[in-house]
């Protein structure tokens, strides 16, 4: 028996906030798990510290499935982003420990390598075509072989996915990360939106991108849950000539049935799921083959144990993976994705936004990005170590995700 001796929550903010669980066994093996829930970080930290850690001490670290079920079913209150991020962190840390005990990189315990590396996509964006083209070229120079394209809408200053700044140390945000209220406390940035203007503009952008960059480059686009099924169907149809790799999150995530209408009206591939936290959120989508890619993040979907079940369920229906890899998933969560990406037969693509230098000093990762492909490296376990001294230098800094309003002020999906 490899007994759990202790577990600890580490909150650090090297430019953005991360919550990490470190589990230590009686024989001194440590495992890391990512518990970062962007904009609501401390809720998970408290859930872990007050409700989960007291249950871990004395358990056998090797019994990962049993611990997962114990935390999930034992709580009675199932699912939800806070609970599932907490369970995810425990699960990742236990897989990290198991792979270290086995002295293998984690992907070896998940079935070994199905490919040499995971195709990654990066985020290009621009307020106008010129800026967008520069950003696409910059991403190609960084090695990306697949690119997500987000663009400003004429007449709107602040639109989702259009990087506010390149970020001095290399990290890009999909939004302006902070607005300060009285006393310096962070408040949500407000963005503005008009769906008709967006639906008119986006096809012209993809037409321009295809004529500049050619037919081959895989292009993706994120609708960020902003359309009705009819609007999403219109967008999907109008993008068909530009052969997208996928259209992501076209309708709000809660409504699985909404995708039926979209699916019936367009052949543009569909992806959804970054805000989902359970395989049950996909039950209709997968069994009715309404989507092509599942977008969950390991951190928000109960960890490696649950994400593997989701991927296997999806595989039976010909649905592939496209795990959520923004910079608010820590290098620990991203490493877990890469081990799965390497092992799963139905891997599709991996989102890869690069962490800042400051983040990579706190989290030292064996991740490699070569020729457009990601690899988790050959270190045993997840392949990430946490520099506790570096972590301590970055105190928690409250931050919110933006909110989005229509031109008349109505709150809209962000
Ligand atoms: O809005 O990670 O596909 N990526 C995205 C991200 C998400 C943020 C939320 O925390 O949609 O930009
Ligand atoms: Co997204």
Image (spheres, grey):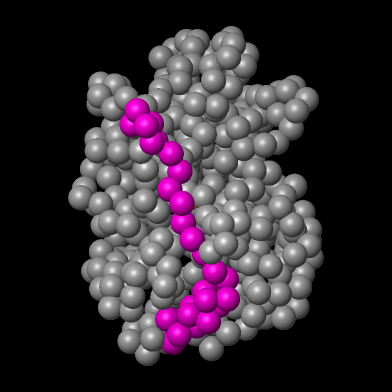
Q: Is residue 194 magenta?
A: yes
Q: Residue furthest front?
A: 408
Name the residue at 25% across, 68% down: 138
Q: Foreground: 66 or 231?
A: 231
| Rendering coords of residue 144 (x, y %) | 33, 66
* Above or below 106: residue 235: below
For the question of whether residue 315 can be seen, the reply is yes
Q: Is residue 217 left or right of residue 228?
A: left
- Image height of 143 relative to 402, above or below: below
What's drawn in magenta, residue-wise?
181-207
Residue 349 location (% of width, % of height): 49, 62
Residue occupying the point 59% across, 11% down: 54
The answer to whether one can see residue 342 in this image is no
Left or right of 358? Residue 312 is right
Residue occupying image coordinates x 64% and y 80% = 234
Going by the image, does 8 lie left or right of 364? right
Give the x, y percent position of residue 6.
Answer: 49, 12
Query: How many numbered marks does the figure carry?
Result: 0
Quarter-of-image position of residue 63 = top right
Q: Residue at x 30, y 38 (%)?
A: 15
Point out the image quarter for the C terminus: bottom right
Q: In which quadrant will I find the N terminus?
A: top right
Reply yes or no: does residue 69 show up in magenta: no
Q: Nearer the viewer, residue 40 or 387?
A: 40
Among the 4 quarters of the image, the one containing residue 261: bottom right
Residue 85, position in %: x, y? 57, 34
Left or right placement of residue 359 versus residue 33 in this view: left
Depicted 345 relative to depicted 309: above or below: below
């Amino acid at each position: 028996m490899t007994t759990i001796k202790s577990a600890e929550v580490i909150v650090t903010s090297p430019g953005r906030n991360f919550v990490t669980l470190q589990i230590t066994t009686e024989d001194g093996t440590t495992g890391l798990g990512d518990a970062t829930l962007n904009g609501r970080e401390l809720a998970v930290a408290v859930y872990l510290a007050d409700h989960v850690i007291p249950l871990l001490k004395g358990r056998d670290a090797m019994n990962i499935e049993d611990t997962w079920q114990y935390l999930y079913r034992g709580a009675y209150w199932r699912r939800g982003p806070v609970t599932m991020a907490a369970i995810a962190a425990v699960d990742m840390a236990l897989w990290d420990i198991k792979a270290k005990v086995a002295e293998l990189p984690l992907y070896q315990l998940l079935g070994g390598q199905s490919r040499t590396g995971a195709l990654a996509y990066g985020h290009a964006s621009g307020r106008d075509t010129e800026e967008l083209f520069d950003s696409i070229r910059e991403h190609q120079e960084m090695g990306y072989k697949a690119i997500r394209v987000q663009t400003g809408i004429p007449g709107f200053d602040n639109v989702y996915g259009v990087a506010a700044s390149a970020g001095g140390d290399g990290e890009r945000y999909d939004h302006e990360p902070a607005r300060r209220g009285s006393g310096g406390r962070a408040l949500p940035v407000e963005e503005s939106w008009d769906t008709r203007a967006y639906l008119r503009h986006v096809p012209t952008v993809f037409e321009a991108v295809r004529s500049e960059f050619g037919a081959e480059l895989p292009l993706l686009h994120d609708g960020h849950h902003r359309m009705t099924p009819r609007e999403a169907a219109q967008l999907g149809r109008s993008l068909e000539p530009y052969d997208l790799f996928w259209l992501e999150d076209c309708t709000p995530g809660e409504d699985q049935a909404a995708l039926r209408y979209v699916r019936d009206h367009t052949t543009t591939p569909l992806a959804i799921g970054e805000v989902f936290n359970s395989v049950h959120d996909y039950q209709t989508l997968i069994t009715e083959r309404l989507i092509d890619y599942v977008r969950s993040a390991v951190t928000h979907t109960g960890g490696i144990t649950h994400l593997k079940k989701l991927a296997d369920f999806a595989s039976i229906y010909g649905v592939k993976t496209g795990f959520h890899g923004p910079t608010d998933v820590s290098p620990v969560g991203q490493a877990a994705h890469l081990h799965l990406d390497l092992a799963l037969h139905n891997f599709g693509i991996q989102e890869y936004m690069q962490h800042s230098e400051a983040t990579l000093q706190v989290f030292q990762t064996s991740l490699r990005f070569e020729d457009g492909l990601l690899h988790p490296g050959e270190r045993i376990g997840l392949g990430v170590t946490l520099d506790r001294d570096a972590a301590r230098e970055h105190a928690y800094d409250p931050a919110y995700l933006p909110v989005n309003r229509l031109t008349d002020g109505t709150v809209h999906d962000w």
